């Protein structure tokens, strides 16, 4: 009889300890669903784009992968006002720094941006492959289609609008690879740049 009672008490004690161990653990919160910007609210729960190993390689293909990723970070910044991930990949590139400051100011004042995200259609590394080495300037032409852009104030008033340009535009970038990573040292819209012949 004593053995049965002891076994029952031990089982109850184990159950109590198990319950105590799990009761204080927070339940994992469900991931918030991303929602794009609208004319009445800023985007929410936008996930920062991830890079890949190729984007760190000091090759022409690595430069292309990096630039695709960089434009993804520009798109993320437009949707969120969070320019830090983009700026971590910039060294110089005054036009990019100015654009980031303007964007930060919009969001700091309670405003937001709808659209305007750059969609890269192609990237041409114009520096000869043999010259794509650590520390060297590597030049690229980037064809981009940018969606219609609308900037809103905190109260939802339209501050600026830019239409969609069907033909897109071309950017010229200069990037440099050092210490296992690329940085943008220059990025400018150059709509009259001639693209390489296929």
Image (tube, grey):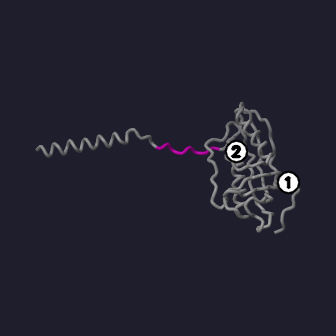
The C terminus appears in which quarter of the rendering?
A: bottom right
Residue sitting at 66 percent across and 59 percent down?
56
From the image, give the main secondary structure of the stretch colored magenta: loop
Answer whether residue 34 is magenta in the image. Answer: yes
Residue highlighted by disc 1? 190
Label 2 to label 1: alpha-carbon separation: 22 Å
Of residues 83 and 45, the one drawn nearer to the viewer in this rendering: 83
The disc placed on residue 77 is 2
For residue 143, which quarter of the picture?
A: bottom right
Image spot of residue 118 (x, y percent): 75, 51
For residue 26, which quarter of the picture?
A: top left
Tell me if mark 2 has few (under 14), some (14-19) or many (20+) residues whose alpha carbon lies within 10 angstroms of its own: many
Residue 51 left/right relative to 166 = left
The disc placed on residue 177 is none
**Mark toward the start of the polypeptide (2 vs 1):** 2
In the picture as drawn, the residue positioned furthest to the top comes out as 155
Residue sitting at 75 percent across and 58 percent down?
135
Residue sitting at 74 percent across and 54 percent down?
119
Tell me if mark 1 has few (under 14), some (14-19) or many (20+) residues whose alpha carbon lies within 10 angstroms of its own: some
Image spot of residue 83 (x, y percent): 70, 43
Image spot of residue 147 (x, y percent): 76, 49
Of residues 149 and 110, the one drawn nearer to the viewer in this rendering: 110
Magenta residues, as a range?
28-35
């Amino acid at each position: 009889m004593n053995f049965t009672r002891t076994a029952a008490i031990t089982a109850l004690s184990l159950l109590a300890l198990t319950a105590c161990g799990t009761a204080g653990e927070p339940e994992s919160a469900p991931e918030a669903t991303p929602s794009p910007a609208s004319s009445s609210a800023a985007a929410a729960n936008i996930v920062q784009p991830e890079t890949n190993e190729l984007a760190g390689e000091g090759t022409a293909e690595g430069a292309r992968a990096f630039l695709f990723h960089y434009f993804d970070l520009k798109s993320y910044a437009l949707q969120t006002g969070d320019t830090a991930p983009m700026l971590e990949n910039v060294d110089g590139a005054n036009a990019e720094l100015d654009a980031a400051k303007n964007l930060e100011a919009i969001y700091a004042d309670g405003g937001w941006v709808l659209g305007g995200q750059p969609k890269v259609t192609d990237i041409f590394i114009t520096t000869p492959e043999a010259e794509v080495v650590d520390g060297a300037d590597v030049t690229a032409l980037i064809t981009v289609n940018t969606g219609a852009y609308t900037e809103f104030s905190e109260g939802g008033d339209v501050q600026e609008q830019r239409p969609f340009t069907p033909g897109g535009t071309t950017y010229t970038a200069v990037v440099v690879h050092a210490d296992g990573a690329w940085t943008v040292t220059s990025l400018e819209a150059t709509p009259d740049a001639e693209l390489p012949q296929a």
